[in-house]
């Protein structure tokens, strides 16, 4: 079967107002169902790259194609519809702490409802059932009615993954998803992210500091340094010495 390209960067540049070049002539393609780790020193441009994929930041020039459509040019309804396809996972989980797991997960469906309905919590029975199903995939159904602030960090990240699955995404972007977790919990969360690829054929792009986890989970590794793409290889061709190089000759900020 021919590979289907889900994400493509074409000559993407991002220059911040300060004059700092966050991204410089970035080009790459990612296929459906690939699990990609983005590695690089602090300040290399990993977050800038991730945030330009769902247009959280505007690029300066170039094209960011999601399923063949240049998201950097979209606005209004077309942008909202495109964002449904793109799930986000954050280092700090971004849950509403004082509300239930169920409501947090249902919020992942909000792109499919008018705002007033989501404000009133008027989700369909089918979506409430879907919330249970998605929580089951990350082994969190038993916490359905618990408040988010009663959960551990690893449990919160699992709820965030279930919330993302409510969108039926084709692409999930995770920005340092395990940075605030201990090694054992990190592995559990990485396993859950890996299952998105394995069982749902979702493309997963993870910004990660740990080279060890990158090598363990990724199909492909992309390396950034000073806003430039300096590495892009399938895991079969990647090795630790290569990756060490990405981290050399740079200064931790
Ligand atoms: N809003 C901003 N305004 C100006 N410069 C910015 C802004 N955001 C990021 N930068 C700069 O752009 C460059 C890339 O930053 P970015 O946050 O993308 O790196 P990163 O690889 O994600 O780093 P980290 O691993 O620390 O999160 C850095 O030099 C940073 O200082």
Image (cartoon, grey):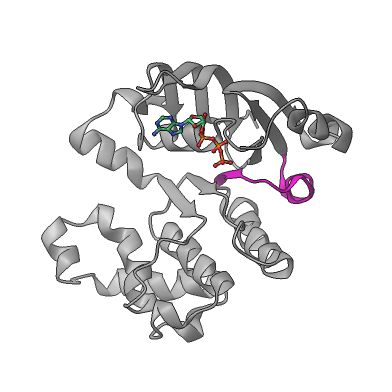
Please name whichever residue, 194 or 212, is drawn nearer the observer in this view of the structure.
Answer: 212
How many numbered badges does the structure rendering display? 0
Q: Residue at x 39, y 37 (%)?
A: 54
Q: Which residues are magenta?
A: 203-219
Residue 79 in the image, given as x and y percentages of width and height = 27, 35
Residue 108 appears in which quarter of the rendering?
bottom left
- Asked if residue 94 lies in the magenta stretch, the reply is no
Q: Residue at x 50, y 86 (%)?
A: 142
- As drawn, is 138 to the left or to the right of 241? left
Q: Residue at x 71, y 35 (%)?
A: 221
Please name whichever residue, 192 or 168, is drawn nearer the observer in this view of the structure.
Answer: 192
- Asked if residue 205 lies in the magenta stretch, the reply is yes
- As drawn, is 126 to the left or to the right of 15? left
Residue 235 in the image, given as x and y percentages of width and height = 79, 37
Residue 163 in the image, given as x and y percentages of width and height = 42, 63
Quarter holding the N terminus is: top right
Please name whichever residue, 13 or 180, is drawn nearer the observer in this view of the structure.
Answer: 180
Q: Residue at x 25, y 54 (%)?
A: 112
Quarter holding the C terminus is: top right
Residue 224 in the image, given as x and y percentages of width and height = 64, 28
- As drawn, is 118 to the left or to the right of 194? left
């Amino acid at each position: 079967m021919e590979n289907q390209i889900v994400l493509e960067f074409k000559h993407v540049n991002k220059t911040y107002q300060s004059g700092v070049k966050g991204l410089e002539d970035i080009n790459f393609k990612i296929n459906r169902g690939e699990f990609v780790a983005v590695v690089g020193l602090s300040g290399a441009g990993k977050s800038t790259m991730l945030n330009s994929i769902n247009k959280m930041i505007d690029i300066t020039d170039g094209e960011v194609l999601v399923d063949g459509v240049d998201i950097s040019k979209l606005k209004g309804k077309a942008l909202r519809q495109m964002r449904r396809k793109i799930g986000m996972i954050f280092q700090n989980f971004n849950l509403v702490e004082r509300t239930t797991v169920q409501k947090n997960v249902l919020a992942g469906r909000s792109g499919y409802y008018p705002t007033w309905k989501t404000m009133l919590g008027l989700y369909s029975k089918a979506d409430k059932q879907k919330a249970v199903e998605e929580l089951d995939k990350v082994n969190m159904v038993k916490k359905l009615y618990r408040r988010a602030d009663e959960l551990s960090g690893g449990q919160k990240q699992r709820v965030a993954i279930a919330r993302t699955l409510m969108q039926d995404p084709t692409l999930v972007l995770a920005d340092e998803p395990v940075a605030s977790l201990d090694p054992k919990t990190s592995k559990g969360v990485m396993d859950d992210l890996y299952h998105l690829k394995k069982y749902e054929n979702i493309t997963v792009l993870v910004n990660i500091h740990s080279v060890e986890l990158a090598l363990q989970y990724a199909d492909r590794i992309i390396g950034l340094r000073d806003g430039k793409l300096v590495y892009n290889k399938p895991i079969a061709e990647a090795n630790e010495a290569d990756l060490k190089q990405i981290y050399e000759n740079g200064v931790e900020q």
